Image (spheres, rainbow, N blue to C red):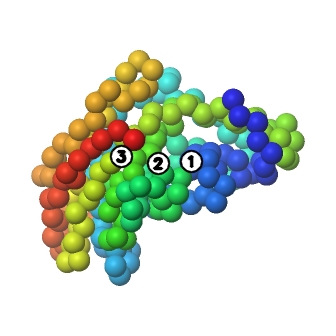
Amino acid sequence: MVRIAKNALLVAAIYVLGGCAAFTFPEKEITSFAEVPEGYVLLVGKIELEPPLRPTEIKLDISNDVFNTEEMMANRAIIGLSERANVTVEKSGFLINPELGQTYFFAVPRERAHMLGGYITVSFDMRTNGPRDVIVNQGKVLVPGGMHYDLRPDDDVVYVGTLRLERGPFNDVTKAEVVDEFDSATRDLTTKLGTGRRMRNSLPIQVSAN
């Protein structure tokens, strides 16, 4: 349990985004190739949690949710990407928010090739006792990082695999592996965004615990 002296309307957003006061909101998934800015690459992949979170396990209770933080937390991960490997998720400056078990499509700056890890929120409870008096409880599954994506200057779309996480009875990750589901991801890409862009299969080399 944490007691914080901060504006109550900001507390939930700060905590779901890593507890960093100078927080960064996660990027939105793209819905068309035209939304990928110059100097960015479209990152395609998936995050799976085994066994999946049961509806009865997810307990989110946020009052005055003006930042839609519950939407960021419900069956989703917060993942930090950075230019450097030796920074924390909270200081990455660039977050994606993929839905678990679904192929994701995020426009990412080419230089942000280090996946630092992140977390999946299982429970979140916030109680406000006043405008500057808030109590927060948060339960998480920590997502291991230590991965480097090979993002090349001529890449349009890069597939980085399915990060499959096995969790133990205390929501600790007991195994992390990257699974190649390129053919399935290609079908999802075509269904969501259409054709016309080549997707390169480039699984990360290393997965290690934070």
Label of residue 186 in the image? none
Residue wearing tag 2: 78
| First-in-chain label (2 vs 1) | 1
Numbered disc in front, either 3 or 2: 3
Label of residue 18 in the image? 1
* Residue 187 in view: no
- Taking 162 as reference, is 150 above or below it? below
Residue depicted at x 51% and y 62%: 93
- Whole-angstrom CA distance, mark 1 to mark 3, is 15 Å
Residue depicted at x 45% and y 33%: 141
Kindly identify the amino acid type of the residue bearing the numbered disc 2. Ile
* Residue 157 in view: yes
Image location (x, y in percent) of residue 177: 23, 38
Quadrant for the N terminus, please: top right
User: In the structure shown, which secondary structural element does the residue marked by tag 2 occupy?
Assistant: strand
Image location (x, y in percent) of residue 174: 32, 26
Kindly identify the amino acid type of the residue bearing the numbered disc 1. Gly
- Whole-angstrom CA distance, mark 3 to mark 2, is 12 Å
Quadrant for the C terminus, please: top left
Q: Are marks 3 and 2 in contact (CB under 8 Å)?
A: no
Residue wearing tag 3: 145
Residue depicted at x 79% and y 51%: 7
Q: Are marks 2 and 1 in contact (CB under 8 Å)?
A: yes
- Taking 192 as reference, is 137 above or below it? above
* Identity of the residue furthest to the bottom in this view: 38
Image location (x, y in percent) of residue 9: 75, 51
Q: Are marks 1 and 3 in contact (CB under 8 Å)?
A: no
Q: Is residue 128 left or right of residue 196?
A: right
* Identity of the residue furthest to the left in this view: 183
